[in-house]
Structure formats: structure tokens, C-alpha cells
Amino acid sequence: MVNVKVEIMEDNKILNYIKKVLENMPTGWLSITTHRLDIYDEKLAKAQFLEQFEILFNNNNSESSALSELPTAYDYIRLGHPLSCILEWGIANLNNLKPKNVISFSSKTIPILAILRKNLLDNKNTQIIYTGELPDVFDAELLKRVYGYTFEIKKVAQISAIPEFDGSTIFVSQQDEIYNVDLTQNIDFFINTHSHLGSILLVNGEENESYVSDIQHVRRRETIAMTPANSLAALRSLIGKSSFDTKKSNVETNKTRVLDSIAAITGTNTKALVGSSGLSIQYAILMGLIHDALEKHKGKDIKIIVPPNCYGGTNDQARRVAACIDNVEILDLPVDGGHDMVQSIDLVLDKIANQDAIPYIIAEIPTNPRVEVPDLTQLKEVLSKERYTAAGEIAIDPVFILDQTFCPNVHFLGEDEILSTVRTISFASGSKFPSGGLCTAGYCVGNKKTAALMGTIELHLKLCDNEATDLQMEILAKQMPSMNQRIKDAYTNTREFVNFIKDTLPEAKINFVSSALAKKGFTPSVFSLDLPTRGNTDEEKESYKRALNHKLINLMITEIPNESKFCVSYGQLKGCYWTIPATSTQGTTKEGDKDYIARVALSPDMDLELHKKVFLDFVENIG
């Protein structure tokens, strides 16, 4: 009896503290999608935040100033953020679990897929148990046929009826109170789903803790964490302040506005798809194309062609897909830093044609981080070229998957545009220009040549429950109409800053588009800066340059704290972001392919003269 009272008192202490935290939380917890890297250690993501949060909890300190000083939980909000961490911490403590064993998702199905993926690679059996209904979009046949997952599904009347099983037991529960959990020994993974908020996954038992990092990696690469707004709703429900607010936004109106904006921006009239993030969209594209290949070209190998130094999420996700499916292989595509994208594509497509395989190419234009644009006429010719198999038959033509996040305003796909006659699907991350950094949603659109593929891609977007949330659609509907003007204004600032750096530090190497390319519509607001170095050996020179990168960034964020931030993103509404791709966006890229240079992202709204002044101070103090 005493123990029960102690537990109730402890539970009340936790809930009361969360209540005070929600009253005093910094506004940025809800409103931004990227966080400061100067107070972030990727190896300690979530853990470092919660360690400091626990100290505040133990001291009953919920002051806004103290909460503002907590270290960054994750570099991108789609991976997790303060509110998702606190939700997971609260549910873990109320169920005597470690916080790392509770993982929230925006998707209701991906937590199931995360466990199935690990068990596929570990050759372990899985049973999925449920009482009421599984999520509507869960398609067992498709998961077995396309993803290669194996599992059994059983419906039971109650938890006590779960049968013994040699393997992992996943229990799926659908209920309005997403935090309600009934953990029993015979459940390895408890997944609570909510029709509006997403899902909470609880990893039960020490023997299953080896799954945690793998599940987190699925959340990192194939979906997103429960969004800040939905995490807040779940936390409010947890503390009993209110049930989930079912306030209806103008969902259909917002969706129509977003789709109309995408059509106008891309110059297309085919159906666009909007996902919870750029990587959610990319995952749907890859799985949709693989599905199409399995149906139309049975038995043939699938080759995914990826630049080895592109954004780590793109690179890593493609390799993870290939690891799960026998006839899918990754081929490297060198695209910049001395390599020509067109020549590389020509060579790799010849090789794939000879093998009678199916080519899917993922590439960024402009490239990241060196902001290079290939000769588009030559690119079109190489992608259009008729090739032949070793047996002399016409080879399967490629699908070009174009990441145009840096320049989403350029028309590639519409009638008579440069890639209108090549099977091309374009996608963009919505946390950049489309939303100005206010949400993570991303979108994709195809040209007429890929219209038939888009239905299959949509099928996988829905299967993974990775469509944009209602609030994400509302934000995009508001922000996208001004996107092209913001891109134009941010480019003007960037060109001026680039010219200033050239004048004040001519020894530095700057990667940015030429004026000729800008006249053709390529107006990014991102450039990379290779600072001058010194030393007697390559190691000394590299070490000096890396230190100088940090010196520059630290000066900028110290002297201009309200505008200059050490952040991963770009396309933001205000200020200037600085990062080093090798230690942020290229996180899982092979070491030899990483870029230890500074990447700078300017916005349409910033004090450019102050940034010039501080940069000049930096130059004068290089020594």
C-alpha cells in the first residue's frame, strides 16, 4: 500500500512538473525546425537534453530561462525535439522504463516497419497482435511482397490471450489516450496509435534494448518524430489539462492551395504528393519505383545511383533500402569537386544497360554543398540516349529523381522544359524554402512521362502513413505563395555577400553559381566557403582549415546572436545559418567523401552590412 502511494506521489510530481514546463516553454520549441549546433553533441542526441532536463526536474525548476538553456536535443526537428523528448520521458517514467525505450512517431505504421526491418536483417520471426483494428493504411500483402518483411498477424480479445511465440511480439493498440499502456511480459514492443497524433512505441525488456538505435535510425531516415504541435497535444492530454483538441482546420482548402502552389512553382499540371518531410517523400519514391519494377520487370536487378557525398539522409536512406531487398544495389555517382555529373551518368547508365538492369538516379541540382549545375542540355541527351543490353535489346530507360531543394523555383518538368521528355520526378524539402523553416513537410511532382508512377508512389506514402499533417499543410498553404519572391531576395543578399568575401579574402575558394547560371533561374541563397590554409603537410593544412572554419562560425554567432546561427538548414525566413556539411548534413557519408568546408545560407531578411563588418574583422584577425 505504501509503495502504491509513493508511486502515485511520484507520478503526480512528474505530471505537475510537465504542466509547469508547458506553461513556460520557449516559443521556439513549437515554431522552428532546426536547432543550434554549438550546443549539440550528435552522439548524445536526446540523452544530453534529458540529462539536463532531469536536473531541472529534480530541482523543480521550470523557469523559461532555464528551459531556454537546455542543450539541443536533435539537429533537425523531424528527428526529435524538446517536446517529443519530454513526452517520451514522461511516458517512460510513468511506466518504469528508460526514456530511450520510448519513441514517438508522426506515423502510425512506421514503428511496426522499423521492427520488421531489424528482424528481416537479423532473420528473426515477428508476430503482430492487436485487439481492435490495425491502422487502416497497414497493408500486410504489400509489406511482404515489396519490402520483403515476414510476419504473422493475430487478433486477440484481450492482452492476456497473446500466444507464446519464438521471436518478437508487437502489440498494436488504437486509442484516444495515447499514453495509456498495459505492458506485460509477453509483449516485446507496445505500439499505441492515435488517429490524429501519430504513435508511441515502447520497447519492453532489457533483451530488446538492442532495437532502440535501429528504431531511432528508421525514424531518422524514413519518417519523422511526432510533430511539435502533436507532441504538445499529447502532453496536454497526459497531464489531464484537456483531451485532444479536434479543432478542424480547412484541410481540403489548404491542400488545394498547396497543390496549386506546387503546380505554379514547378510549371507542371500532374498530381503532386506532399509528405511529412523530404525524406518521407524520397522513401515513398524509392519504394514506389521498386514496386513498379517488381511488377513490370520481374527478376531484373534494380540499381539506385547516388552521389557518394550528397546529403547524408539521401545517401543513407538509399543504402538502407538496398540492404533489405536482394535485387537492389547502390552505385556511386561522382558529381562535383572535379567530377562531371553528365559524364558520370553516361558511364554508369552504359554499365547498367549492359547488365539489363533498371536504373534509378538520385541527384541534386545544384549539388550540395558545392552548388554546381551540370550542362542541362547534355544531361537531357545522356538521360534520353537509347542504350542496349549485352544481348542487343533496347535497355530500360532511367528514372531521374531530382532533388531541387536548393532551387525549387527552376522549371525542369513542365511542357517543353529541359527534362520534360525524360522520366523525371522532382522533390524538395519543405523545411527549407517552401515553409521558410516553419515545418518539415516535403513534396514531389513528376512530369507527364512519370504520371503512371505517381499512383504507386502515393500508395507507399500512405502505407508508411507519411503524408503531411493538417498543420503542415496549413503552414505550406500560407508560406508557399511568397516562396519565389523570398528566393529572389535571399539570392540578392547572397550574391552581395559572396562578392564582398571575394574582395576582402580573395585567397578563399567560393562555390556559388555563376551570374550566367543565375540568369537562367538558378538563384540559390547558399554558398560554400573553402578558407585559405597553411601548413607543411596535407594533414597540417586540413587541420588549420578546420580550426579556421570554427573560428569564423563562432565569431559570427557570438557577434550577431540574433541573426547568425550555427544551424544545418537554409531557405529560412530570417537571419544567416552557418554549418560544416561534414559534421552535420553529411553525417553518415563515408569519411573520404565528406566536405570540411563552411556552408552559408542567407535569407531575404537580415542585416547584411553587419555580417560584412564581422567578416572583415575575421579577415583582419586571421594572422
Image: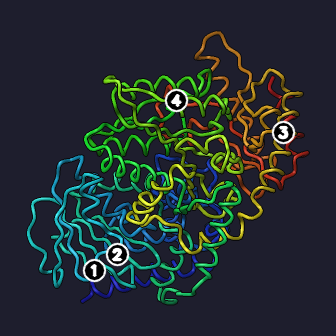
Closer to the chain start, of discs 4 and 1, is 1
The image quarter in which residue 538 lies: top right
Q: Position of residue 366 (x, y in %)?
A: 66, 38
Identity, as a three-letter code, of the amino acid under mark 3: Arg
Camera sees residue 566? no
Q: Position of residue 175 (x, y in %)?
A: 35, 83
Q: Is residue 297 left or right of residue 577?
A: left
Identity, as a three-letter code, of the amino acid under mark 4: Lys
Q: Position of residue 432 (x, y in %)?
A: 66, 54
Q: Residues within 10 Å of mark 1 (few under 14, many from 20)?
A: few
Closer to the chain start, of discs 1 and 3, is 1
The image quarter in which residue 207 lies: bottom left
Pointer 1 with pointer 3, Cβ within 8 A: no
Label 4 to label 1: alpha-carbon separation? 50 Å
Q: Residues within 10 Å of mark 3 (few under 14, many from 20)?
A: many
- Write down the residue under mark 3: 495
Camera sees residue 74? yes
Label 3 to label 2: alpha-carbon separation? 50 Å
Asked which secondary structure carries label 4, the reply is loop
- Write down the residue under mark 2: 136
Q: How many numbered badges does the structure rendering display?
A: 4
Label 2 to label 4: alpha-carbon separation? 43 Å
- Write down the residue under mark 4: 385
Pointer 3 with pointer 2, Cβ within 8 A: no
Q: Position of residue 127 (x, y in %)?
A: 17, 65
Q: Of residues 97 and 432, which is closer to you in this image?
A: 432
Identity, as a three-letter code, of the amino acid under mark 2: Asp
- Write down the residue under mark 1: 133
Q: Quadrant of the N terminus?
A: bottom left
